[in-house]
Image (cartoon, grey):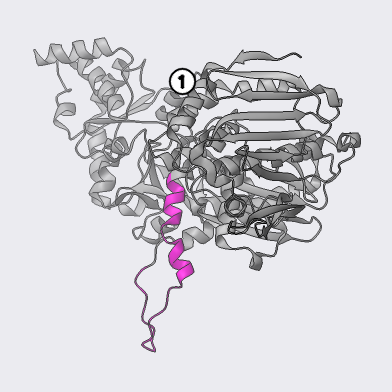
Amino acid sequence: MSKQTLSFQAEVAQLLHLVTHSLYSNQEIFLRELISNASDACDKLRFEALNNNALYEDAPNLEVRVSFDKDAKTLTIQDNGIGMSAQEAIDHLGTIAKSGTKDFMGKLTGDQKADAQLIGQFGVGFYSGFIVADKITVESRRAGLKADEGVRWVSGGAGDFEVETINRPARGTSVILHLRDDASEYLNAWKLKQVIGKYSDHISLPILMEKEEWKESEKEGEPGGMVKTGEWETVNKASALWTRPKKDITEEQYQEFYKAISHDHENPLTWAHNRVEGNTEYTQLLYIPAKAPFDLWNRDKKAGVKLYVKRVFIMDDAEALMPSYLRFVKGVIDSSDLPLNVSRELLQESRDVRSIREGSTKRVLSMLEDLAKHDKHDAPAEGADGVTDVVSEEDKAKEGKYTAFYAEFGAVLKEGLGEDFANRERLAKLLRFASTTSDAVSVGFADYKARMKEGQEAIYYITADTLAAAKNSPQLEVFKKKGIEVLLMTDRVDEWALNYLHDFDGTPLQSVAKGAVDLGKLQDEAEKKAAEEAAEAFKPVLAKLKEALKDKAEDVRVTTRLVDSPACLVVQDDGMSTQLARMLKQAGQKAPETKPVLEVNAEHPLVKKLDGSVHFHDLAHILFDQALLAEGGLPEDPAAYVKRVNALLA
């Protein structure tokens, strides 16, 4: 290919403008990104070479080299990984996924340091080189191609780039940064080693730099300086972090490793690093993030931990190693038993993989249980001996972390009730909700049970679209009157998840919007008798209501659950709630055609007016539609509802 000039994809040009004009406050992240890319290229070669050992050519030892030339003002990051063909250079360096750029732009906050950290998260790390360079030259040859099939790619970071075929004997890629004057500090070995140590110490490949030594000037009166010796030395630990003993790894190193594999700029909430031995041997280093990723709810996005086999990188996002409801977990699993040529299909069938998945799931749940246990501490208690209990610094550091976790990932965790039967009881203990006694999403089932009223036989809950709708639901009126706590569930997943959880620790869960209200021992005999008498006296009106609403309501009955409202809608015990039916229809899915039950408050003035009213038919339909509105629904015919109300008002 002779030299040709091509234009960047429009989104790349937009991104480059941003990089070169805005993200300069945290310059050093460019080196982290380029070394990370070089390491990935070596991992890809190692993986492809499993089936074609010839790809190693005459250089089986994979490495990354960092060098600089003060006179030319260039910094070079070179790897002997998989490399690129000419077409791959055009495709990979001239275009990026449109959605990735759009999401990247949408996440920018104006905080330069935070914005700079987003670069790697959106797969655009290469372009961070333009933070310090006014021109970048990339020379590469894909493993397996001939020496004369190398490629040179050059761009000044404006609207276009040049690409041509070159002769390149060595496979792999060299990224040559032509540094701007204000980035000359990166032409210094000490500075480069400091940045590599900070961001890239965990890279399992050796990162090499040329040794320097002090040399006196041969001219009298002139200062000496550092000169290169021609020998190369490893400047990182060059061993996978998860293979090192825990006692040799600092908290900062764990945190930096997390940031490198997750492209998250915040520290994780917690992590677990363990060597598991037994029938299946593997090492796990698992992290729980502090913030949900932007694509947490994107069902097409692959999620999962990184899989290594005997320290050889196999794949990102090994979904088979972690259940879907824990898709937010980041980390590494390194197996000693899986074959090196393991495929995604084989992962689904392997007994060893099932064992790893079960063990890793339990480890994550243990981390969450530990956070939940330390989520809030009462004041240190004074023992019988007069000595106040001491809360350790480690325990203090965990306070509030579970609340933070649940705010980000609680809705995802609930998916586990339907996906993970084996751990359902453990998951139930980790769930938190608002309630009629607390707007904060902090009430667990165990907390609720501990303060149940004497004689209460069920855990009561209600589902709604919003907290306000739940708190103000007419169905709560009798519970509020009697001081019975009700859990308020407002996540869209709640309706689905509760289908798989019928009781907690032997106590049944009861929706206040399903079935007839039965407060059992909490309702005294006088109340029961009064309700029965009211229902008997109201029978003629009920019969007329059933006839008027036969197309809308399955049944009409007198209720004991209402205090201030005239009516409410409920469904039968085994029926689908109206909220779930609405959600299915909004998602374009079919919902069974079921009719709700209308319950009326025989003591309400509006209901009393029904008897003998000339507007009986209109009042009946208004009662039904208002009950529908109160629970967040809409009348089937809004215009007819408005017309009826206006007629009565007039």
**Residue occupying the point 42% across, 46% down:** 407
Q: Secondary structure at mark 1?
A: helix
Q: Is residue 591 visible?
A: no
Query: Which quarter of the rendered picture does the C terminus lie within?
Result: top left
For residue 54, side relative to residue 456 (left or right):
right
> Quadrant location of the N terminus?
top right
Q: Position of residue 509 (x, y in %)?
A: 45, 47
Residue furthest toward the bottom? 385
- Residues in magenta? 378-407
Question: Counting other residues with Cα less than 10 Å from the Cα at mark 1, is it few (<14), some (14-19), or many (20 or more)?
Answer: few
Task: Give the side of residue 174 with respect to residue 482, left or right.
Answer: right
Say which of 396 and 222 sits in front. Answer: 222
Question: The residue under label 1 is which amino acid type?
Answer: Lys
Residue 168 shows up from this direction:
yes
Seen as rendered, the residue at the extreme front is 220
- Decide whether residue 404 is among the magenta residues: yes
**Is 255 placed above or below 644 here?**
below
In the picture of the structure, the residue carrying the numbered disc 1 is 585
Residue 124, given in percent of the width and then of the height, sits at 57, 31
* Residue toward you, 29 or 232: 232
Looking at the image, which is closer to me, 140 or 388? 140
Residue at horizontal 47%, vertical 25%? 17
